[in-house]
Amino acid sequence: MDCRVAAEPAVFLLVGYGRVSRRSQIVRGRMVAGGRKRWLAMTADRLLTGP
């Protein structure tokens, strides 16, 4: 497993669509990235919105 993102479903959608800041959710503890390549979580929002 390269990257694992743990987040509340609603928070993940809001971050993915750009409605809330990813940084604010990480600080509040609602999103956590783990695994060998944690930095891949920074691009996870592209999976929801497309290219």
Image (cartoon, rainbow, N blue to C red):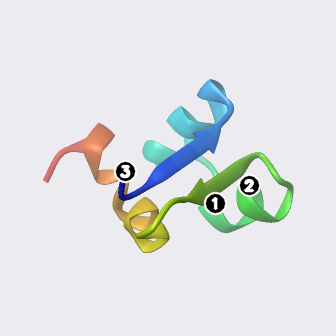
Closer to the chain start, of discs 2 and 3, is 3
Whole-Å distance between the Cαs marked 2 and 1? 7 Å
Of badges 3 and 1, the one in the foreground is 3
| View extreme (top): residue | 9
For residue 1, the mark is 3
Q: Amino acid at mark 1?
A: Ser
Instruction: Depth check: give the residue in front, 39 or 1.
Output: 1
- If the image is split into quadrants, where does the C terminus sit? bottom left
Q: Is residue 20 left or right of residue 28?
A: left
Query: Marks 2/3: CA distance?
Result: 23 Å
Q: Residue at x 45, y 68 (%)?
A: 36
Residue tagged 2: 25
Q: Residues within 10 Å of mark 3 (few under 14, many from 20)?
A: few
For image coordinates 44% across by 42% down, the residue present is: 17
Q: Quadrant of residue 16?
A: top left
Element at badge 2? helix
Residue at 86% across, 56% down: 28
The type of residue carrying mark 2 is Gln
- Image x and y of residue 42, in percent: 44, 66
As drawn, the label of residue 37 is none
Asked whether, in this view, residue 29 is left or right of residue 9, the answer is right
Q: Residue furthest right?
A: 28
Q: CA distance from mark 3 to mark 1?
A: 26 Å
Instruction: Determine whether the residue tagged by mark 3 lies in a helix, strand or loop.
Output: loop
- The relative height of residue 48 versus residue 15 in the rendered view (above or below) is above
Q: Which residue is mark 1?
A: 21
Q: Could you say where residue 7 lies in the image, as x and y percent from the top left?
A: 65, 39
Find numbered disc 1 in the image and state the secondary structure of the residue it sits on: loop
What amino acid is labelled 3 in the image?
Met
Which residue is more in the foreground, 8 or 20?
8
